[in-house]
Image (cartoon, rainbow, N blue to C red):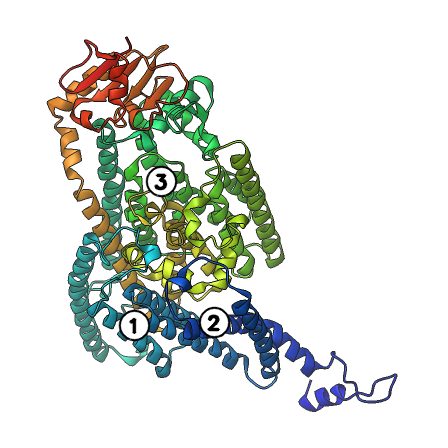
Amino acid sequence: MSTNEEVIIDQTPDPVSGSISDSPSDPAEMRHEHKFYRLLPDRVFQAFFIIHSLYLLVGGYNEAALAPTPLSVAIYLPGLLFFAAYLLFTFQLCRFLKPATIKEISVWVWFFYALILSVHTQMASVALGLLLISFVFCYYRKYRRIYHLIPLAALFARMLHLLLTPPPEKLPQIFASLPAKPWLEPASKQALNTFIAVSAVLLLLYVGSRIRNRVVKRKESDSTTDHTSDRTSNCILPAKLGLSDQIYNSVTNTAAFIILAIAVVLNSVWGGLYLIARVRLFHASTFDMGLFTQMFHYMRRDFTPLTTLERDGLLSHFHVHISPIYYLLLPLFALFPRPETLNIAQIIVVASGVIPLVLLAREWRFSTQATILFAALYLAQPAMILSNFYDIHENIFLAPLVLWLIYAVRRGGPIRITLATILLLMVKEDAALYVISIALCLFVGAKDRDLTVMPAQRARMTALLMTSLALTAFILEISYLANSGSGAMTWRYNNLLTYPQLGLPGIVLTVIENPTLILTTIFVTPKIGYIILTFLAMGLLPLLMRKRALFFLWLPFLVMNLLSNYKYQFDITFQYNYGSHALLLITAMLSYIRLRHSDIRYEKLVANALLLVALVGAFTQSAIFLRERNHSIQSLLNPSQTNILRHETLPQIPRDDVIVVADTFLTAHLADIRELYDMGYYNTTKERPDPDMLVLLRSRREQYKNLPFFLEKGYVESELSNEEIMVFTKP
């Protein structure tokens, strides 16, 4: 249809009035309404950050601004009025400005807020966080013009200024209880040094290869040579070193398999030996090794997840965390009922996540080399090795099951998706967060063939069903814990509970009312080392996203690891990293494959370079953390007389019809006793039968605050005591 024909149709007289139609069906008006709704998220974003920029300018950045307290009406009402006025104003702007212009306003509004906050804050870590967000924002929106670098440079300068001239009190008072951690862990520093050395060598190889290619091109005829091709663009390494394609592929494939073998040794052999050493050397305590070993003994005998260690009394572990997924390990424990079995099972379960990861790589048509290297990267990830350091935990299932669910979503089978979703929800009550984040990613990216092969409408319906199932399970489990259990551990987010009466949903209101608190909490100084360690082990690839659906895969990392000030949730050696880091690795893989398929020559080289960064960062950091614990492995291989004596004494403790109170480092070895308590948590004021025996470590005698209570009751050492272990019996 020509332009003139469109004008004639637009001006067709109305059949009723005879005048030219001015109804909403007018194409120009319809285009405006479509533009209005399509740009609504950007305009809401703009209004939101303009309001909070003004709040910062007027109220400043202080303890009151960071406190999780409700805003007064005097502050709230003007903000709402401005919000409504801005939407009405930009509604008219949509008629005259191009969508790209309105979208670009968003980045400048963010820059405005970020610069104001960076000027007010005294933490260099917050300036770094704002710089990272700004970079991701510009990269996602493809803003590469010179003038976009000006605010980025200003944020970088402010960060350097704060680093070089630190204020006397670095942290606001509300963060004073957080542990003091360096910006760069020692392992991260060595990883960076190693990468600089390796990259220097590869850069020289690349330059040499480019020079050689130019010489070869001059000698080859124009008819047989593609002058626009880059001989190194499809290589994993930045140079072919003058080798033929066949020899080069053979060499690089062999090297990739060697890297994978090293990753297996790092993850399963070296890491496994350390976990066995923790148990054999009595380094594993009641929390969590002792209580879960006792729970498995109960499950083996009665099929019930009972324990007396967790809350100083007999109760089901499902009154603390609802984790029926543990029953999958019961057959293995029934065959080998020892605490070491659980730690070995932990290694196997986490490492099994490499299977769905390889299947996903095949779905996305990764090269053989890239598939092998990403499998090695998964096994070498600090989150997949170091999170095991505090022994068995239900969170070990998160990494493989998250990857299986993403694979099921990619393939699109309803039975496969349902099974993977149910298994993931069986891990723990907060596993719903992982299901919801994947479902949101699927809903927004329903037309993305990398995410799923399902038709868009079916994909969105599947996402809604997954979300409904996850929310239902979460609400039921939280209600059960509140009414029949010990309650959900929402106290870990007290730092963000502006409205405690609303519980966890109240955090959403905190995000709306006080994004400054949220951003400061995420990028507070003690968390920066954890963030750098994480992204160095993934080569910064998760930051290079161009698909908005993938941002939803960041939710568990933000919520589970960064929003809480509970220090263990942003510690790489605790068990809160499996699921969130598996999702980040998926975003890294999708970012990598997008760069590799790019028509821009340098982006292919960047993809390989960042994969190299990831491999060096992951291997170096994991190896250094393990090397720091080599003394445990050496002690395991060369046991001391002290440990030999302990292992000889503990089997002599009676197991049947006795009540035993033991040291926290002995409970895992005595966990087959039905009524076993931890000396450090034993409440002497409870009305219950006195224990028959106390089994304690002589070297820790001064640390037992309850021991005088039992000695006054007449407890005396038995003949089972020796120079290492004290065994007291009831009079």
N-terminal of the two: label 3 or label 2? 2
Establish if 296 lies above or below 426. Answer: above
Circles 1 and 2 in contact, beta carbons < 8 Å: no
Residue 278 screen position, x and y as percent: 23, 32
Which circle, 1 or 2, is nearer the viewer?
2
Of the residues shown, which amino acid type is indicated by label 1?
Answer: Asp
N-terminal of the two: label 3 or label 1? 1
> Dot 3 lies on which element?
helix
Circles 3 and 2 in contact, beta carbons < 8 Å: no
N-terminal of the two: label 1 or label 2? 2
Residue 147 screen position, x and y as percent: 36, 83
Q: In which quarter of the image is residue 635?
A: top left
Mark 2: give few (<14), some (14-19) or many (20+) Cα within 10 Å: some
Of the residues shown, which amino acid type is indicated by label 3?
Answer: Val
Determine the residue positioned at 23% across, 37% down.
269
Residue 267 screen position, x and y as percent: 27, 41
Q: Name the residue under label 2.
A: 49
Which mark, by number, is residue 230?
A: 1
> Dot 1 lies on which element?
loop
Establish if 597 lies above or below 264. Answer: below
Establish if 703 lies above or below 264. Answer: above
Mark 1: give few (<14), some (14-19) or many (20+) Cα within 10 Å: few
For the residues labelled 1 and 2, the Cα–Cα distance comes to 44 Å
In the image, 394 versus 317, the foreground residue is 317
Q: Name the residue under label 3.
A: 350
Of all residues shown, which one is farthest toward the right?
16
The C terminus is located in which quarter?
top left
Of the residues shown, which amino acid type is indicated by label 2?
Answer: Phe
For the residues labelled 3 and 1, the Cα–Cα distance comes to 39 Å
In the image, 286 versus 553, the foreground residue is 286
In the image, 55 versus 130, the foreground residue is 55
